[in-house]
Image (cartoon, rainbow, N blue to C red):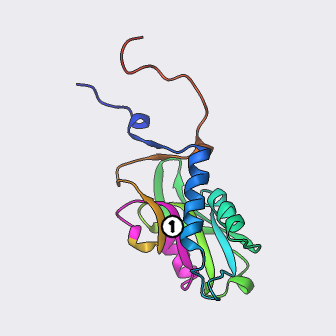
Amino acid sequence: MYEPLPHEKGFHVSWDQLHRDARALAWRLDGKGPDDGAWRAVVAITRGGMAPAMIVARELDIRTVDTISVKSYDHQTQGAAQILKSPDMDIIGDGTGILVIDDLVDTGRTLDVVRAHMPKAHIATVYAKPMAKERVQTFVTEVSQDTWIFFPWDLALQYVQPYRGK
């Protein structure tokens, strides 16, 4: 019996696809901010949220962009989430009018830590898995819980053996 390798079960996201999906996220967020539809700032959850946050900030013309660095993965193993770097809390406050952007919500551990830090922020991700999609107010695409998403910053072009033959 043929057992697919993990990379064959994965969801591979190209730079082009990420750009399209992040723009779709921006379209869903446009006009939804509390200040006559505007958002005060974007906070990217590093590192995965940086590229989509930059795209969302550009599309929505948001000039104040900061980061929150939360570590919860060591390669493909998830552990306890911890904040390594906080945004400027004088600007962020309780999160009112702030868009927090990440690439993916998986188990929700990272977002739980961020939510405790900025309780009134609007959290949006490009991709969401069923276990924690309710922790996100806005997302673009749902993927199954057992799918591993390969983001473009984790990949390099290389030869792949055909499924049949040599």
- Classify the position of the N terminus by image quarter: top left
**Secondary structure category for the residue under label 1:** helix
Q: Position of residue 120 (x, y in %)?
A: 55, 86
Q: Is residue 19 magenta?
A: no
Identify the residue shown where x is 58% and y is 53%.
20
Residue 21's place in the image compared with 13, above or below, is: below
Q: Is residue 128 magenta?
A: yes
- Report the magenta residues as a range: 111-133
Outermost residue to the top: 166
- The type of residue carrying mark 1 is Thr
State the residue in front, 105 or 114: 105
Q: Which residue is under mark 1?
A: 110
Residue 18's place in the image compared with 31, above or below, is: above
State the residue in front, 16 or 118: 16
- Classify the position of the C terminus by image quarter: top left
Identify the residue shown where x is 66% and y is 71%.
43
Horizontal arrangement in the rendering, residue 18 relative to residue 67 (left or right): left
Identify the residue shown where x is 36% and y is 17%.
164
